[in-house]
Amino acid sequence: MNDEIKEITERMKTFREMLLLPKPNGLDFESWLDNFQEQDEKELASRILNHFIYFSDDLIDQMLRTVVGRCGYYFMQNVPGWNHNSFTSECWYSFIQGENPDDATDSGYIFTRKLREVLNIPDKRIIKFDALFKKLEENTSTPQNVILVDDFVGSGAQTDDAWNKHKLGLKNITLSELQNRYNHRIIYAPLVVNDMGLLRIERRCPNLHLEYIYHLGLKYNLFNLNSIFWAGDSCLYDRFLSMMSKIAKEQKIPITGGNSVNDVMGFAKQGLALAFHHGIPDACPAFFYWNTENWKPLKKRPYHR
């Protein structure tokens, strides 16, 4: 093991001891590095690990408190008489639902539970996505205040669909139409937003107010030569691309140009290197979570988003 690899792994072990990183069953960087047999590839993998972003559960809780607090500033400017008590008495909470409403692994359910346990939001104020439509329909003369919580926005496709395509409730219209007709105040409050998703939401969902904590620009994409991983070094970048092509073929990881949620470049070629305590999003290349007899994951992917 060369000095750079040793330095990075020792640093990550220190972070684990300080509880900044989880135990190996939560983020197993030792086993993941062992997937790379050649020294050249192990050096590239270590370089990627050095910039890998991990959000612990405690950090997620604090980020959730912060982003909901920011929503309060927006309501203070737009809702007469809004105060701290209004969070529990004059606001509805839900989440952006995926394609399958019965998917119990959707991370939205994790965050609605955190609203109750971390922010002490009453159960009656936390409603399912389809129930939100009914609630907004019942209050056509009184604009309602809504916060949609989430952990991560990747491509923005799911948010776009939830805002502009899903038609629910008795009126069978979209959230966008409900907002336009009755002036409901709806805020989407994810913790982390990728650049691709941010641009799509701004373009496709102009009436959906957005609050977030972290914005990930193009410099966080592994497949960008000028990213934080390669810093414009074309030699390093070319070696990385060759390694990824080899891994994809050997491990039978889909090569679909970003069309598959398990794509070698991540869904929509987002190429992100990050994970949350509860899982890793499909915006990340599959080699981070691929799990076979001869490939061990850095982080297992038990949830969908």
Image (cartoon, helix red, strand yellow):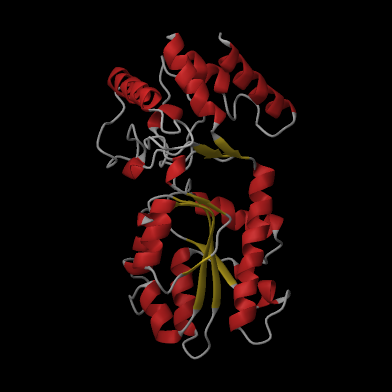
- Residue at 70%, 60% (x, y): give it: 119
Residue 35 appears in view: no
Residue 46 placement (x, y as % from top left): 52, 21
- Residue at 59%, 66% (x, y): give it: 126
Residue 241 placement (x, y as % from top left): 33, 26
Q: How many marks?
A: 0
- On screen, residue 238 above or below 39: below
- On screen, residue 243 above or below 70: above
- On screen, residue 29 above or below 58: above
- On screen, residue 245 above or below 59: above
Residue 162 placement (x, y as % from top left): 38, 63
Residue 224 appears in view: yes
- Residue at 39%, 82% (x, y): give it: 180
- Whether residue 37 sits left or right of residue 191 in the image: it is left
- Whether residue 185 sits left or right of residue 235 in the image: it is right
* Viewer-proximal residue among 123 and 290: 290
Splitting the image into 4 quarters, where does residue 20 fall? top right
Splitting the image into 4 quarters, where does residue 99 fall? bottom left
Quadrant of the image for the N terminus? top right
